[in-house]
Amino acid sequence: MTPGCLELDDLDPTRVTRILEHAQHWKEQPSTLPRVLEGFGVAALFQKPSARTRSSVEMAVATLGGHPIYIRPEEVDLDVREPVEDVARTLASYVRIISARVFSHHTLERMAAAVDVPVVNLLSDAGHPVQALADLLTLRERFGSVEGRRLAYVGDGNNVAASLAFAAAMSGLELVVASPPGYELDQQVVDRARNLGAVVDLVSDPYDAVRGADAVYTDTWTSMGQEQERELRLRAFDGWTIDAALMKLGAPDAVFMHCLPAHRGEEVAAEVIDGPQSVVWEQTENRMHSVRALFVELVEAP
């Protein structure tokens, strides 16, 4: 069975490094892009809408010579109109890669078990590996190397934080995660990342996390599907906004990161996300470059 990427630990440090090297090279020299998807399609199935994910995947496939096939949730109606496995097998008859943005990570696991083409996680409740690859690429461009650099993630220990933990294991990045009580990064994720060699620290004070950090990262406090928890979360995260005072505790050349969409005045102050330390738009662009290199890696894997 051809391996896919449901999380970064489906790869290994050598492959992640190769993906990042290729992504940076092809970004700088697009004329050297391999047309490895010429004559092939890539399915992009979305249970959850997205601006960056859909656009970056479609452009990545197109620039590799392939044909992106965008599939809306109502077109397949997973486990209602057809079982997940039947949808995956149907798509595998037509495409070289299946990518999907889903609510439940188990949906991706069922797809991967049913087919012999790579399945790529474009976001699930458990992880966001394509975002983490773009984040590593952004840090690599800014600092030259990510090994030994310290990233402070401040906020909900969610799917983005989980993938950053695995990114740390694959790259030598050091990660410290600060979250309010009840919103910490899952201990199983922490243990798995540490077993893979990651340096992952958990703290309860955002100031402790940011002090001396090379990068400061946050995400929305209320993700898609959690809207009913919004008021509760706003109270829990009161005082956790990334503002200029907090950023001053980071390293002199520290950068601010956010996977977007952002809510100015909640998890981040406008002066930070729109200020000179922000690299959020580099992250956004790098979504395409990193997923493109990932697709090449999966297609060319022995």
Image: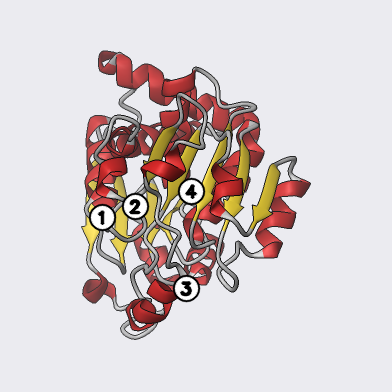
Type of the residue with mark 2: Val
Type of the residue with mark 3: Ala
Q: Nearer the viewer, mark 4 or mark 2?
A: 2
> What label sits on residue 129 in the rendered view?
4
Report whether residue 143 is seen: yes
Mark 1 or mark 3, which has the lower sequence index?
3
> What label sits on residue 236 in the rendered view?
3
Q: Nearer the viewer, mark 4 or mark 3?
A: 3
The answer to whether mark 2 and mark 1 are in CB contact below 8 A is yes
| Residues packed near mark 3 inside 10 Å, few (<14), some (14 to 19) or many (20 plus) | some
Report whether residue 5 is seen: no
The residue singled out by tag 1 in the image is: 264
- State how far apart marks 1 and 3 are (Cα): 17 Å
- State how far apart marks 4 and 1 are (Cα): 25 Å
Q: Is residue 49 above or below residue 77?
A: above
Q: Helix or strand or loop: what does disc 4 sit on?
A: helix
The residue singled out by tag 2 in the image is: 268
- State how far apart marks 2 and 3 are (Cα): 15 Å
- State how far apart marks 4 and 3 are (Cα): 27 Å
